């Protein structure tokens, strides 16, 4: 159960998300209250306990910290900190993630999170829209290193739990069936317009960046709303729904029928998949694009990126392409991640006017 409380900050309405849990055990409820009183300002979770449940391991976290671990003995009242998860992070230097809500064009309530760069007024900022992957997943409140990286570089970042995101009930989930590039994309677009109406976003400096389905949403945004975005970053994203379905990895074979139901059948829904595949409408893309891809990606095959890059280069559209031969679905090697974020930083700085590392050092 949750109760939401509205809060005004310099003319912008946020939802302050207060989490309220229902406990069936009174003793457990009192323990939670006691821990939250000891550790104010953090989410508090019991991660383990002794067999008799009298000694517990406690973890905290927030939007600006990966938190710490604590030991608590219920019999002796002994309470001590064991370790910080990320002691190198200074919470005072990081940006707050605020829950937001707005109404879609067809009346759905869309939830999400807005992170504003610390020290800047929320007015006419360069913005990065960051749609999540899945799409049958969701963004959550908590520490997100990519979001903090972008906020540190001067960008407001909005994460949208568009229709078909999980955690909002079956009806909301099903509202996104066969709506890739359609109503799902409209929810993301409506979030951009909400930011502009609030005065937070500079309408001429809006970028979009996402991975996997978020990469698809990036391409769809540049394709189906070409005047909305100044640039896009597609990280292991899908460009052609037909080839994506064709290359479903063997370990997904058992859910192929479900995939057809929620995304589209390549034979029965051929017209739909053609309509919503960015590759077939690449002639509409005007904004610069940065594409990053793992050569051994079993989920979103490299051909997805190759196709869109080739189509744009033929038309003379600026496209930067990074391929890492030792990566799969998302970069896991640290040196590759450094390369990606440095390249994205330069790319966004060039097209959105945010800060870059060299400028900060100056």
Image: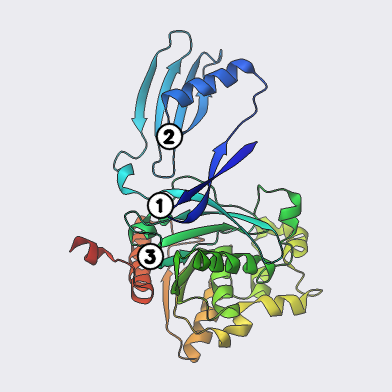
Which residue sits furthest bottom?
A: 315
Image height of 72 relative to 162, above or below: above
Could you tell me how far apart the alpha carbons at marks 2 and 1 are, in whole angstroms? 19 Å
How far from the left and from the top, in percent, is residue 318?
42, 84
The mark that comes first in sequence, 2 or 1, is 2
How far from the left and from the top, in percent, is residue 131?
54, 62
- Helix, strand or loop under label 1: helix
Name the residue rendered at 30%, 48% in the picture: 93
Which residue sits furthest right?
A: 268
Circles 2, 1 touching at the beta carbon (< 8 Å): no
Residue 340 appears in view: yes
Disc 1 crowd rating (10 Å Cα; few below 14, some 14-19, many 20+) is: few
Say whether residue 271 is left or right of residue 130.
right
Say whether residue 94 is left or right of residue 9.
left
Circles 2, 3 touching at the beta carbon (< 8 Å): no
- For residue 41, the mark is 2
The mark that comes first in sequence, 2 or 3, is 2
Could you tell me how far apart the alpha carbons at marks 3 and 1 are, in whole angstroms? 14 Å
Could you tell me how far apart the alpha carbons at marks 2 and 3 are, in whole angstroms? 33 Å
- Helix, strand or loop under label 3: helix
Q: Nearer the viewer, mark 2 or mark 3?
A: 2
Residue 237 appears in view: no
Of residues 140 and 256, the one drawn nearer to the viewer in this rendering: 140
- For residue 318, the mark is none
Q: Identify residue for label 3.
A: 340
Circles 3, 1 touching at the beta carbon (< 8 Å): no
Of residues 248 and 357, the one drawn nearer to the viewer in this rendering: 357
Name the residue rendered at 52%, 61% in the picture: 329
Q: Identify residue for label 1.
A: 145
Q: Nearer the viewer, mark 3 or mark 1?
A: 1
The N terminus, quarter of image: top right
């Amino acid at each position: 159960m949750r109760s939401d409380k509205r809060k005004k900050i310099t003319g912008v309405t946020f939802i302050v998300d207060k989490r309220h849990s229902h406990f069936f055990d009174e003793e457990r409820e009192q323990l939670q209250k006691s821990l939250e009183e000891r550790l104010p300002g953090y989410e508090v979770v019991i991660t383990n306990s002794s067999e008799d449940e009298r000694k517990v391991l406690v973890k905290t976290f927030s939007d600006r910290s990966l938190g710490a671990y604590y030991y608590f003995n219920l019999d002796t009242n002994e309470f001590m900190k064991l370790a910080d998860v990320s002691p190198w992070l200074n919470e005072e230097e990081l940006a707050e993630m605020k829950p937001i809500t707005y109404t879609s064009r067809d009346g759905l309530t869309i939830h999400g999170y807005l992170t504003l760069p610390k020290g800047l007024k929320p007015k006419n900022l360069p913005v990065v829209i960051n749609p999540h992957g899945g799409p049958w997943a969701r963004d959550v409140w908590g520490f997100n290193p990519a979001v903090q990286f972008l906020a540190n570089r001067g960008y407001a970042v909005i994460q949208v739990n568009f229709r078909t995101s999980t955690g909002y009930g079956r009806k909301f989930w099903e509202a996104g069936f066969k709506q890739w590039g359609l109503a799902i994309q409209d929810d993301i677009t409506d979030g951009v317009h909400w930011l502009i109406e609030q005065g937070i976003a500079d309408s001429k400096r809006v970028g979009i960046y996402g991975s996997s389905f978020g990469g698809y949403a990036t391409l769809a945004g540049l394709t189906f709303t070409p005047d909305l975005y100044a640039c896009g970053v597609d990280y292991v994203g899908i460009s052609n729904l037909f080839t994506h379905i064709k290359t479903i990895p063997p370990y997904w074979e058992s859910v192929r029928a479900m995939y057809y139901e929620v995304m589209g059948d390549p034979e029965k829904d051929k017209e739909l998949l053609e309509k919503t595949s960015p590759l077939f409408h690449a002639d509409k893309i005007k904004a610069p694009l940065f594409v990053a891809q793992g050569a051994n990606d079993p989920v979103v095959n490299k051909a997805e990126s190759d196709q869109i890059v080739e189509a744009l280069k033929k038309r003379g559209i600026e496209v930067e392409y990074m391929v890492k031969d030792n990566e799969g679905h998302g970069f896991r090697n640290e040196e590759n991640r450094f390369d990606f974020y440095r390249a994205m930083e330069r790319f966004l700085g060039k097209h959105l006017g945010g800060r870059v590392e060299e400028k900060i050092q100056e």
